[in-house]
Amino acid sequence: AAAAGTGGLLLPLSETEQQRYSELFSRCCPLPEAAAGGSSVGELFRASQLPPDTLHQITEVCGAKRVGYFGPAQFYIALKLIAAAQSGFPVRIESIKNELPLPRFMALKNDTEVRYGTPAEFHGVKFQVPHASLEKNSYKRTDEGDKQEPKSPPMSPICSPPASPSTYQRIPLSYGYGKARSGLEQQHGAPYEVRHSTHQQDGPSSGNYGAKSAPTCSTPNRSLSVEREQQDSSTQYADDPWRITEEQRDYYINQFRSLQPDLNAFISGSVAKNFFTKSKLPIPELSHIWELSDVDCDGALTLPEFCAAFHLVVARKNGYQLPETLPETLLPEYLQAACLKPMCDCALFDSYSEPLPSSQQTRDFSRAEKSSAEEVPDNSVLLQDGKKDDKQALKVSTTLKTIPKEFQHLTVKAAAQEPNALRARPRSRSYSSTSIEDAMKKGEEPPTPPPRPQKSHSRASSLDLNKIFQQNTQAVRSGWLPPPPPALPPRPSVSQTEQPSEVELHPQMNRPPSQAEENSSAKKEVVLAQPPSKPARRKLRTEAQGLETPELSPAINVTSALPAVKPHLPVQKQSSRQKRAIQTAIRKNKEANAVLARLNSELQQQLKEVHKERIALETQLEQLRPVTVL
Amino acid sequence: LSQCDSLCPQNYPLYIRSVPTENELKFHYTVHTSLDVVDEKISAMGKALVDQRELYLGLLYPTEDYKVYGYVTNSKVKFVMVVDSSNTALRDNEIRSMFRKLHNSYTDIMCNPFYNPGDRIHSRAFDTMVNSMMMQVC
């Protein structure tokens, strides 16, 4: 039994405690008999997942503050106090006289497994291992914590994070993650920020994804953040690329509102199509994303479906391959349960309890549903259940957010017609710039709409193609109209009317960067066209973290300048200045579109002909063959 | 052996899938010729457009027997299925249910706003459905 020197207090340590503490002490302090290194001790303490207030208290009580260093005695006392705090006891010398379990340090258990030094770990494979193991640890801890809790009342809200992981583990929804993050956010630095900076060279996709999912926290403390992010992700699955983080969800919900103010209603297919085409992903991929996310196959997106689709788009833009089936965390039932909760969490803790059991239910349902796919009735039933929860949650949430008011005000017109909806979006963007910096930056991205052509981004190619096919455009347009099948006439006409209104949005965002790109790349390269716009979107996300790329800085300057300009200028001035730009853009896009359509039809013709030829040759061969056999 | 075909009103294929990939061209040709018969049946039906028809072409190729089934939707989209005659276990009901599944999947594709009617069908959901169906048959 070791003796502690604080005021002559004898501190009995059990065998296991002795072993553990000495192990920890040696870890923190390379030299025996010397003081433990302050930073490593700090790391260790923070790994205990106690709030810093408690840790300060512990350091005071154990005497390290007084003597100025962490000697073995102080260290052991501190460990004991940590154990006490984790069990819910107040931080006092008296409490450590009792029998206590070993203090639990989240990161240390698995520091061999989870090291975020390599970007390979980013991509989800290794996360499963830390998830499982860390979950077990938390389970153990909470079990012990539960045992201790009846004895002593929990100290204060400060201590509640260690106790409440029990709820986390039962229902590891990102809702719980959201709560933890909001609780721990102020206390701990920006983990992803740090990680991002370390992985800058390692690949834009992984770094961006991590950076993107980070909250904008205040102080990036390096050692702190590495462990904190381990704990966060371990308990909260933050780095699962298919799990939507809280700020992502908020962003998606805001975007949904900009398209459809009523969160319980649908976004129609055409509206969603316009919106997602702005992301400049190729149409087949967008088609696949739609297939994945529109679970009930009704041609419209509910809020969770929209979030899933948006998330898939975001993931794809950041380099992740699209999955074959919708990941569990993006299922509408799952999302619906978790969807509107982060909006509540700033208000009442009570509201948690009521969505909790239903979310558990829906989660079980979603599991069962996965095994028996294609049960459309189940889907609709679950959606119904989920929607009821949404309505309850909505009542709480809509009173809290200030942004929705602005959006709703702006998009009241949007509810009426599509062209109006498209026009209202630039205005909502300008308002968001004045309210929240993040929303502004992220809000710039989707309204960079590409023109319609499926095969290529016509911006860079439009100039060249226009010169080549200038004389044929008229003939092409007249010749192209018949092919669309008569059975569904509304579609093509709608698409054509949508084109000009889509183009209207171009000038705000895309024209300055596109012009810069066009001037620079004078080739007829279709591939070239894709990257300038793609990094533009990603770039704006990472701008919050200060990532600089020279080629896009003019674009960023322009885009950041424009929203600043917009709040000041009334709408009339804008339109007068940009009418010409809009018209030229419209013309260019129409020409390019016609050209590409003509190409398409020509190629299809060729294909048919080749097919016919092949069939003819084959039949000839068949005829000839019996002759040669004989 | 079987092949599945979706053809749009202009009678060019939107989707073709064969289980054994050899002789695919033969199946293409068969389907094309069967379109005549389908058109004939459509015009004969008059008002009733949606119907599941059976198309037996045992004589077309003396070397090989197979049955060709057809199906037309309201929007004149034709589904043609070529099934090997040696597969006698396949009953009419099953064919009908297969066509119903095809039709449902097709409507799901239609719901996708990124799909333009008249395009080739590249939907993975549709692919998986057709594959599973054809595995069932063979």
Image: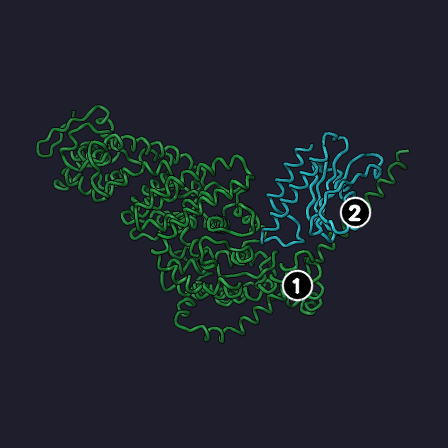
Residue placed at 11% from the left, 28% from the top?
A10
Q: Mark 2 points at which residue?
A: B41
Do callouts 2 and 1 mark residues in contact (Cβ within 8 Å)? Answer: no
Q: Colour of chain B?
A: cyan
Q: Which chain carries label 1?
A: A
Foreground of the two, A537 or A223: A537
Counting from the top left corner in percent of width and height, residue A222 is at 30, 46
Q: Colour of chain A?
A: green
Q: In which quarter of the image is the N terminus of chain A?
A: top left
Q: Distance between the residues labelled 2 and 1?
A: 39 Å
Q: Mark 1 points at which residue?
A: A595
Query: Label 2: few (<14), some or many (≥20) within 10 Å?
Result: some
Q: Which chain carries label 2?
A: B
Callout 2: helix, strand or loop?
Answer: helix
Q: In which quarter of the image is the C terminus of chain A?
A: top right
Counting from the top left corner in percent of width and height, residue A119 is at 43, 43
Callout 1: helix, strand or loop?
Answer: helix
